[in-house]
Image (spheres, grey):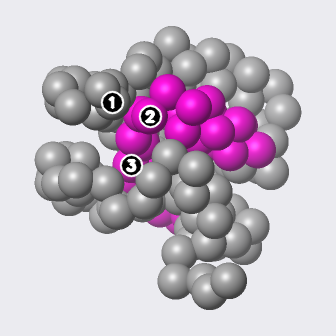
């Protein structure tokens, strides 16, 4: 029986203003602390004004851990330089990203589109 059989409540984690090589470890710990088998998590980036590649790597690591736990993460409300960082890195196509918290909640209420093992593959990619 899958841990996804019984839906977990949706939790939200607010990210700090800056995610860089100094703060990325703490952000990773914050996100991992919110994960548990079958978790449904919204990662709210509305306060993030700066994000480096270290932040993107942190998200990839956390997403990998989430897949191992059959947990789902939807990132939302990124703008400005933080959104640019996700776009330039290509992670905007890998992560499930919503424009609003309401949209993120709606996505988590629906059944997942991807299996846990597919979460780090580009959306709409073939092969």
Q: Please state the horizontal and vertical placement of residue 49, each as a whole percent of the image.
A: 57, 49
SS at mark 1? loop
What's the mark number on residue 74?
3
| Nearer the observer, 49 or 34 | 34
Q: What secondary structure is marked by label 2?
A: loop
Element at badge 3? strand
Instruction: Tell me where residue 27 appears, x and y as whole percent.
Output: 62, 25
Residue 18: x and y, percent?
64, 37
Residue span colored magenta: 57-83
Looking at marks 1 and 3 on the same chain, the residue that comes earlier in the sequence is marked by 1
Which residue is nearer to you in this view: 28 or 36? 36
Residue drawn at point x = 45 percent, y = 53 percent: 115
In the rendered image, the quadrant that contains the C terminus is bottom right
Is 24 located above or below residue 29 in the figure? below
Separation of marks 1 and 3 at Cα, in angstroms: 20 Å
Left or right: 3, with 92 as reference point: left
Q: State if disc 1 and disc 2 touch (CB < 8 Å).
A: yes
Query: Badge 3, how many Cα within 10 Å: few under 14, some, many 20+?
Result: many
Q: Is 31 in the magenta?
A: no
Decide which of tag 2 and tag 1 comes sooner along the chain: 1
Q: Determine which residue is flagged by label 1.
A: 2
Q: According to the image, label 2 marks what residue?
A: 70
Give neighbour class at mark 2: few <14, some 14-19, many 20+ (Cα, 10 Å): many
In the visual, does 31 lie left or right of 99? right
């Amino acid at each position: 029986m899958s841990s996804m059989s019984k839906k977990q409540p949706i939790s939200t984690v607010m990210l700090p203003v800056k995610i860089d090589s100094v703060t990325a470890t703490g952000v990773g710990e914050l996100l991992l602390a919110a994960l548990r088998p079958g978790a449904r998590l919204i990662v709210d980036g509305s306060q993030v004004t700066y994000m480096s590649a270290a932040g993107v790597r942190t998200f990839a690591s956390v997403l990998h851990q989430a897949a191992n736990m059959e947990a789902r993460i939807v990132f939302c409300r990124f703008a400005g330089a933080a959104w640019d960082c996700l776009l330039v890195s290509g992670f905007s196509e890998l992560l499930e990203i919503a424009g609003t918290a309401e949209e993120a909640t709606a996505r988590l209420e629906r059944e997942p589109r991807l299996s846990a093992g597919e979460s780090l593959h580009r959306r709409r990619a073939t092969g």
